[in-house]
Amino acid sequence: MNDLLTVTEAAALLGRHVSGIRAACERGELRAEKLGQQWAIRPADLDTWAGRERRKPGPKTTRKDETK
């Protein structure tokens, strides 16, 4: 696949599970092309997606949650 990454390679680079990367491709969150039965991901698209994922706010906590 030359300079394209497979889902397995992308998952390894990000320390994520393959199913999460595949799901992001299927939902269109991670830009990728389907080549036969495999997703092909450009490294720049993976970097962009990973940056967006890091900036997502986490779940909000309340004072009550913090005391548990």
Image (spheres, helix red, strand yellow):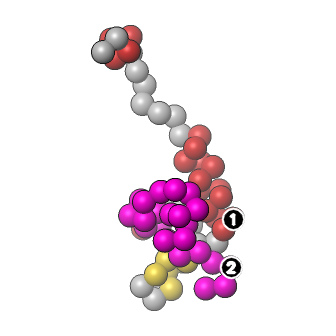
- The residue lying at 51 percent from left, 34 percent from top is 57
In the rendered structure, which disc, 1 or 2, sits on the residue that comes first in sequence? Answer: 2
Secondary-structure class at tag 2: loop
The spot of residue 16 in percent (x, y) is: 47, 57
Residue 67 visible: yes
**Picture quarter with the N terminus:** bottom right
Q: Which residues are magenta?
A: 1-25
According to the image, label 1 marks what residue? 44
Q: Position of residue 43 (x, y in %)?
A: 66, 68
Could you give the CA–CA distance between mark 1 and mark 2, rounded to whole angstroms? 10 Å
Label 1, secondary structure: give it: helix
Does residue 28 appear in this view? no
Measured as percent of width and height from the top left, residue 54 is found at 58, 44
Decide: is 39 above or below 57.
below
Q: Amino acid at mark 2?
A: Asp
Q: Which quarter of the image is occupied by the C terminus?
A: top left
Residue 60, placed above or below residue 15: above
x, y percent for residue 65: 34, 17
Q: Name the side, left or right, on which 38 lies relative to 14.
A: left
Mark 2 highlights which residue?
A: 3
